[in-house]
Amino acid sequence: PSLNPGLKLAKGDYFARIDGDDVALPQWLQTQVNAIEKYPDYSVISSYAVAIDEKNRLKKVYTPPLNREDIILRSLIAPPIHHVGSILKKKDIIKAGGYNERYIYAADYELWERLVRKDFKITTSSKVLVAIREHGKSVSRSEHGRRDLEEIKEIVGRNINNFVNVKFSNDEVSLFCRVNYDEGNLTAAEFNEAIAVTKKVYMNLAPSLKIGDLKMTQWTKARCVIIYLKRIFSFIARKDYSIAREASLKAIKEFGPLSIFAVLWAGSFLGGALMLIPRFYNKILRQKARFQLRNQPNIGMS
């Protein structure tokens, strides 16, 4: 609730925000001011970010989409840009209605949804300018129950109705949300149906969006790969190796024997050793983060 009073009290043309336990990298604010003044048609400019843990150790790089088509495709299921580190044009945010205080956990996602739907322009800087902290005390879905998933479901439902050319039932929208946010707890039948719904969503975008078939196909495949990986990794974390094997085999049939899923299927016969694959994957993400920050000033992150 403090966001709207803060917005009204702000005297400048722009406002920028960052959460209390996150980190603004050097030149964050100046870089964002330069960007929004260079591109005055944009209402919001966010940035790339790195995730860090409670000990300032790098975890991965967040690279939100930059162009309109990818922002629309991303917004169908998740916030298309980061709230943390973004700079916003005050008059445009007020014109759009400010933050909807009914949304406790997804207020930023709801704001981006309205801006995109009303043809305000938002984007992301391809520079890493903030670090988002992920730790045990971060607000997580397990701590505030199902309320945030219900908020996301509402937003996703509106986005689908606005951007997709076919109608979806409430049950289909619910499955679409669950397979992206609660994928490990779907039954096999629910998961199969959710994959079908995912393909239906991305392959039936409204012609008025002018998003080509190739891009829709690429996004559909990428989204399905992520969903399968998250589901398999959730089974590995629970040591349900036989179920992880079954999910990997199904993914092989979908994406081919040369995909990462062949490695996961083979590893599933090694039992506990399968835990090494997610750890190795996370190590790759950390190395990628270090590489992208190689020219950044030393701010104590490792």
Image: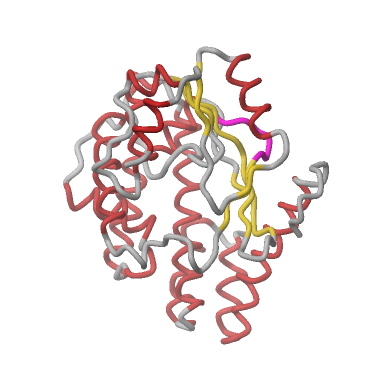
Location of the C terminus by quadrant is bottom right
- Point out the residue furthest to the bottom here: 271
Q: Position of residue 295 (x, y in %)?
A: 82, 41
Asked whether, in this view, residue 152 is left or right of residue 72, the answer is left
Q: Indicate left or right for 93 with 219 as reference.
A: left
- Identity of the residue drawn at 69% across and 62% down: 57
Q: Main secondary structure of the magenta part?
A: strand
User: In which quadrant of the rendered view does residue 276 lie?
Assistant: bottom right
Q: Residue at x 44, y 66 (%)?
A: 231
Is residue 125 located in the magenta-colored stretch of the structure? Answer: yes
Give whichever of 93, 161 is nearer the camera. Answer: 93
Q: Nearer the viewer, residue 244 or 37?
A: 37
- Tell me where residue 9 appears, x and y as whole percent: 40, 26
Whether residue 228 can be seen here: yes
Residue occupying the point 36% across, 67% down: 142
Q: Residue 1: x and y, percent?
A: 32, 42
- Residue at horizontal 40 percent and vertical 28 percent from the top: 7
Q: Is residue 227 above or below residue 88?
A: below
Q: How is the image coloured?
A: secondary structure
Q: Does residue 13 sit above or below 50 in this rendering?
A: above
Q: Quadrant of residue 281?
A: bottom right
Q: Could you tell me if residue 249 is visible in this image?
A: no
Q: What x and y, as percent, mark residue 213? A: 45, 30
Does 102 appear above or below 302? above
Q: Is residue 194 magenta?
A: no
Give the mark count: 0
**Is residue 295 positioned above or below 142 on the image?**
above
Identify the magenta region. Answer: 123-129
